Image (cartoon, helix red, strand yellow):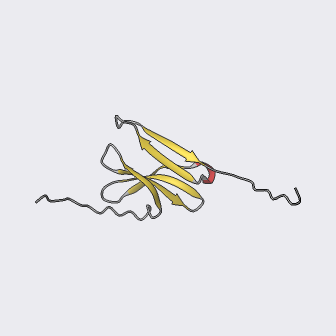
Amino acid sequence: MSAELLQAVQSKEANNMRLLGWTADEGLAISNTVKGGAVVLHVDLQGHSNVFWTCNEGGDRCDASESPDGRHLAFYSQKQSANMWMMENF
């Protein structure tokens, strides 16, 4: 029989998560939607969080990805804008 280790990590700031991944210091990089945009948070295993990065001017999507060597973090931001037109009697 194998024993599984589980640990619940709770953070008040990470209440609307989109993506998460491990960081080199055994914390979590969490993409979180907030009012007016999105942020990437660093959350340690005790649930303490800090903002790594805030998306540009209300971006809809904000993600972070760790490099394979664990020494760098790449950030990605996306903001989409679109127009819709309706034509009659075309």
Task: Using residue 82 as the reference point, say whether residue 15 is left or right of it.
Answer: left
The residue sitting at 35% across, 45% down in the picture is: 23
Q: Position of residue 9 (x, y in %)?
A: 32, 61
Q: Position of residue 69 (x, y in %)?
A: 34, 34
Task: Using residue 2 as the reference point, say whether residue 79 is left or right of it.
Answer: right
The residue sitting at 49% across, 48% down in the picture is: 63
Q: Quadrant of residue 45?
A: bottom left
Depicted 70 relative to depicted 1: above or below:
above
Q: Which quadrant would the N terminus be assigned to in this image? A: bottom left
Depicted 34 relative to depicted 69: above or below:
below
Q: Which quadrant would the C terminus be assigned to in this image? A: bottom right
**Residue farthest along the front direction in this orientation:** 90
Counting labels gives 0
The residue sitting at 48% across, 57% down in the picture is: 32
Q: Position of residue 43 (x, y in %)?
A: 37, 54
Depicted 67 relative to depicted 10: above or below:
above
Task: Using residue 24 as the reference point, say whether residue 13 is left or right of it.
Answer: right
**Residue farthest along the right direction in this orientation:** 89
Q: Position of residue 86 (x, y in %)?
A: 81, 59
The residue sitting at 45% across, 59% down in the picture is: 17
